[in-house]
Amino acid sequence: MMTRAECARWLASRDGFLILTHGRPDGDTVGCSAALCLALRKLGKSAFVLENEEMIDKYAPLHENLTQKEPKPGDILVSVDVSAPHLLPPAALPLAEKIQLRIDHHYTSTSFAPNELVDSAAAACTEIIYDVICELGVALDEPIARALYTGTATDSGCFRYSSTSAHTHLVAAACMEAGLDAAPINLKLFDTVSLNSLRMQAWAIENTRFLLDGRVALCPMPKDTKEKLGIPEEEGGNLSGFLRSIEGVCMAATVRETDEGVTMISMRSLPGFDSSAVCALFGGGGHKAAAGGHKEAPYLEVADEVGRAMCAAVEQAWTAS
């Protein structure tokens, strides 16, 4: 396991980087990849981000002029915010065994690279990338700061989650000192909701099971839900987070049917309740407050299993408290 300084020295001694993000990319993996790519370029190195076919419009501008469609011979592969190989986007899955450096912050992460820097105390992986950039001696500019702030703000829930630390705020402050205007980013990320997201939320309320006296919320989603509602696949918002925000709910999950026969699980929970422990039962993991999993089984069958597991976890935590 590397330190920040060792990771920086490893990067400084090499050239020709291709940075990989995880599937269904969020602000953290996109922010990490963009910030690291820009910092390496400021050192005069060749660096690109592998194009992610699952990128959504909200985060795509961060990768402008940074992406490469496919790896080239000799590329040094670096993954950021990827906790396990199977979480890479489909096109990148064959590259998993070729990754030479992994930087991550998930405490349930799987070791899969010869060189790794993992710090589960970081609220966002961009916090680690910020430290590595500082170790490299690269001064933040506005584009790097924008990428770092996006990842830090999104993975800390705009600095509301229990994982938020003094260091999380220091990274945000450094970004603002570099000339970043955080207000429009916060407006776009946290205070703007699309009509499609509202339609999905309305559907979710009507189709959610509230268990254990309303402390557990579980929403099974057939694969054609978005099609029937006229919503593009990449839109719809963070439904599990929305359900968790309902008063009285301690743990919430969506259980989504896919065309591939794999049921996908997305889970969110309040402090004191461990989403990652539940998702680990379904081949996944993540953070205590936010985690995911999957199982090759009919989605309604998986929903029943997930519901029982969440109820057991909430009851156990409730009793312990």
Image: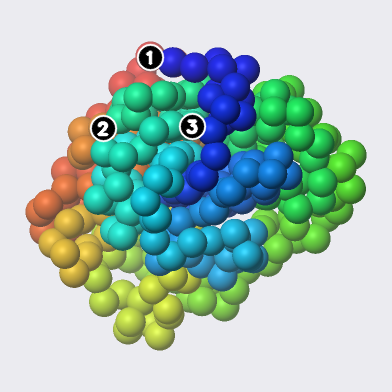
- Location of residue 275 in the rendering, given as x and y in whole percent from the top left corner: 37, 34
Above or below, 152 relative to 142: above
User: Which residue type does callout 1 highlight?
Assistant: Ala
The residue depicted at 82 percent of the width and 46 percent of the height is: 141
Asked if residue 34 can be seen in this view, the reply is yes
Left or right position of 29 against 69 = right
**Which residue is denoted by mark 2 in the rendering?**
280
Question: Pointer 3: residues within 10 angstroms few (<14), some, or many (20+)?
Answer: many
Quadrant (top left, top right, bottom left, bottom right) of the C terminus: top left
Q: Say the numbered circle drawn on residue 320.
A: 1
* Mark 1 to mark 2 CA distance (whole Å): 21 Å
Question: Pointer 1: residues within 10 angstroms few (<14), some, or many (20+)?
Answer: few
- Location of residue 146 in the rendering, given as x and y in whole percent from the top left corner: 74, 51
Asked if residue 127 can be seen in this view, the reply is no
| Marks 3,2: beta carbons within 8 A | no
User: Which residue type does callout 3 highlight?
Assistant: Ile
| Marks 1,3: beta carbons within 8 A | no
Quadrant (top left, top right, bottom left, bottom right) of the N terminus: top left
Dot 3 lies on which element? Answer: strand
- Location of residue 218 in the rendering, given as x and y in whole percent from the top left corner: 32, 51
Query: Which label lies toward us, 1 or 2?
Result: 2
- The colour scheme used here is rainbow
> Which tag, 1 or 2, sits closer to the chain's start?
2
Dot 2 lies on which element? Answer: helix
* Mark 3 to mark 2 CA distance (whole Å): 21 Å
Out of 45 and 184, give the one closest to the viewer.
45
